[in-house]
Amino acid sequence: MVLALAGSIGLHWELFQSVAWLRMVLNYSQDATLSEALAKTFDGKHPCSLCKEIAKGKQSEKASDMPPGWNKFEFSYTATKFLFNAPTQCWKVPMTEVRGNLLADAPPVPPPKSSLA
């Protein structure tokens, strides 16, 4: 599910781009220092073939097949009225006596010993 979400928001291109940069740094560092290789990798003047393919892929995704109006959400508002009608019939619910039963017996004297003691 995470991979599907990452692919739907375009994170796969960032993964490909990271791999391309790593390959470029490794290739350029064979002939120069690491700082020169990093500068050459990220200056934008020396793209590798993978970087060019990634750029093409990003552009082709931006030019989607959907019609131009489909990329915007439009919500229409329709005013509605809520009318509350009182019920025509009512039922009378009988009230019951809410009282607990009284104990007829007095508690034992002396009180029983607790099993916890």
Image: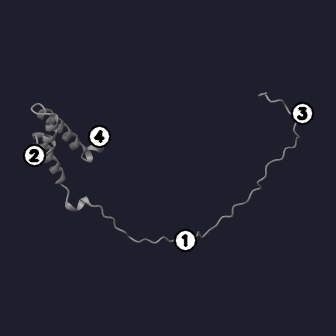
Mark sitting on residue 61: none
Q: Mark 2, mark 3: which one is toward the viewer?
A: 2
Report the residue at 18% width, 36% height from top.
Answer: 22
* Quarter of image, res 103: top right
Q: Quadrant location of the C terminus? A: top right
Give the crowd class for mark 3: few <14, some 14-19, many >=20 residues within 10 Å.
few
The residue pinned by badge 1 equals 85
Question: In the visual, does 83 lie left or right of 13?
Answer: right
Q: How far is disc 1 from disc 3 in space, using C-alphas?
A: 64 Å
Q: How far is disc 2 from disc 4 in space, using C-alphas?
A: 32 Å
Give the crowd class for mark 1: few <14, some 14-19, many >=20 residues within 10 Å.
few
Callout 3 secondary element? loop
Q: Please report whichever mark, 1 or 4, sits nearer to the chain's N-terminal start.
A: 4
Give the crowd class for mark 4: few <14, some 14-19, many >=20 residues within 10 Å.
few
Q: How far is disc 2 from disc 1 in space, using C-alphas?
A: 74 Å
The residue pinned by badge 3 equals 110
* Quarter of image, res 95: bottom right
Question: In the visual, does 7 lie left or right of 98?
Answer: left
Report the residue at 20% width, 39% height from top.
Answer: 18
Q: Mark 2, mark 4: which one is toward the viewer?
A: 2
Q: Amino acid at mark 4?
A: Leu
Residue closest to the eye, 25 or 31 = 31
Q: Please report whichever mark, 2 or 4, sits nearer to the chain's N-terminal start.
A: 4
Q: Position of residue 61 (x, y in %)?
A: 18, 50
Q: Amino acid at mark 1?
A: Asn
Pointer 2 with pointer 3, Cβ within 8 A:
no
Q: Please report whichever mark, 2 or 3, sits nearer to the chain's N-terminal start.
A: 2
Pointer 2 with pointer 1, Cβ within 8 A:
no
Q: Quadrant location of the N terminus? A: top left
Report the residue at 16% width, 37% height from top.
Answer: 35
The residue pinned by badge 2 equals 45
Mark sitting on residue 3: 4
